[in-house]
Image (spheres, grey):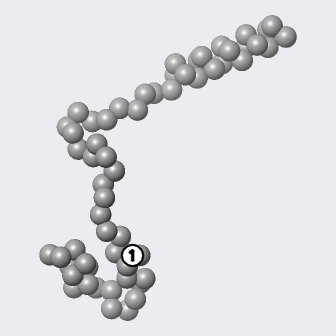
Amino acid sequence: MRTLALAVLSTMVSAVLVAPAAQALPDGLALTPPMGFNNWNTTACRAEFNEAMVKGIADI
């Protein structure tokens, strides 16, 4: 039983040490998830879905 516990513990420690840490890029971009509109949901893939509609949604 002690051998099994030692094997499980060493496996868990190895997994933690081998797993890479998540790191952000140092340029400061995308520190939070990008937020924006989803034109697919608002248009529902209608026939009039075109460039003019996308520009109207984006207020360009």
Residue 14 x/y as whole percent: 59, 17
Specify whether residue 59 is in view. yes
Q: Is residue 51 visible?
A: no
| Number of numbered labels in the structure image | 1
Residue lying at 20% horizontally and 37% vertically, measured from the top left: 27
Relative height, residue 35 to residue 37 (above, below): above
Which residue appears at 72% of the width and 17% of the height?
8
Q: Quadrant of residue 59?
A: bottom left
In-front residue for pair 50/32: 32
Label 1 belongs to which residue? 40
Instruction: Identify the residue at the far right of this view.
Output: 1
- What quarter of the picture does the N terminus occupy? top right
**Furthest residue in direction left, as rendered:** 60
Q: Position of residue 38 (x, y in %)?
A: 35, 70
Q: Is residue 27 left or right of residue 7?
A: left
Q: Residue at x 43, y 82 (%)?
A: 44
Question: Badge 1, how many Cα within 10 Å: few under 14, some, many 20+?
Answer: few
Q: Amino acid at mark 1?
A: Trp
Q: Element at badge 1?
A: helix
Residue most toward the bottom? 47
As drawn, 24 above or below 14: below
Q: Which residue extends farthest top?
A: 2
